Image (tube, rainbow, N blue to C red):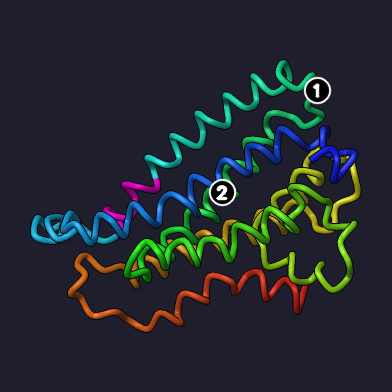
Amino acid sequence: MPQINGGSTETLIPAMIIFSVIVSTLLGMPNEIVNSRNDGVYRNYKINGISKISTLLVPAISTAVHSFIVSCIIFFTAPMLFDIESKYSLISLLIVFFCVYITCSGIALIIGSISDNTSVTVVLAQIIFLPSMLIGGLMIPTSQLPKSLIKFSELLPTTYAMDLLEALNNINPSKYSSLLSILVLLSVGLIGYIVANYLFRFDVTDKSKKKIIALFVLLPFVINILFL
């Protein structure tokens, strides 16, 4: 990262924390959901009367605990390993962690709910993961992107996460207010959980609902781009 962005050491700790959340949610949770469905685990849940939302909260909560532990390890060890100092407050990092986790876990639950196999989950997750890494502010500040990519980057949760970090700490000029970034991220996450609950299937034999509904999760991003 320093070779790409000379100032990346300043944002290394939050970028690594956000990266760990994205990997745990987008690349991990969907596969767990699909495998459990295909192996008949969720069929047993349905027989025993366990609700959809309770079923979805199992991977969401377990992944949250895992992500938080990893983030704590990063926060306490990165300054020693990389000889850097974090200029961001602990409270701001906790707020960003919470918002990013809610957002990415909501999206991950949708991917797991609509995917029939793990090959599909990988493709769908990469559509969000790769752009988030490249143009979402983790490796290169969005302000340094070509104008043609800036609008596209506003469809990515990491863009709002990194901007929120700057807004909360008043270090560099932020594009959005902290309240707006929080509202956008939490709205995406909330819609994600609602849509995932609607589209979730306990069994591979269950009829799939209209998967196009999954795109509703992008609505807060689109509204922000067009009207705010």
**Amino acid residing under circle 1:** Glu
User: Where is residue 227 shown, x and y percent of the image?
Assistant: 76, 77
Q: What is the quadrant of the C terminus in the image?
A: bottom right
Is residue 64 visible in this depiction of the protein? yes
Quarter of the rendering containing residue 148? bottom right
User: Where is residue 145 shown, x and y percent of the image?
Assistant: 86, 61
Q: Residue at x 22, y 61 (%)?
A: 38
Q: What is the quadrant of the N terminus in the image?
A: top right
User: Where is residue 72 shown, x and y percent of the image?
Assistant: 57, 26
Quarter of the rendering containing residue 197? bottom left
Q: Residue at x 58, y 66 (%)?
A: 127
> In this orientation, which residue lies closer to the viewer: 107 or 36?
36
Q: Residue at x 78, y 51 (%)?
A: 163
Rendered image: mark on residue 7: none
Q: Secondary structure at mark 2?
A: helix
Is residue 194 visible in this depiction of the protein? no
Q: Residues within 10 Å of mark 1 (few under 14, many from 20)?
A: some
Region in magenta: 53-60
Q: Residues within 10 Å of mark 2 (few under 14, many from 20)?
A: many
User: Does residue 201 appear left or right of residue 71 in this picture?
Assistant: left
User: Where is residue 10 shown, x and y percent of the image?
Assistant: 83, 33
Q: Residue at x 75, y 79 (%)?
A: 226
Examine the structure image and report whether residue 183 is included in the region drawn in magenta: no
In this view, the residue farthest toward the top is: 80
- Give the residue pinned by disc 1: 85
Dominant SS of magenta comes to helix
Rendered image: mark on residue 22: 2
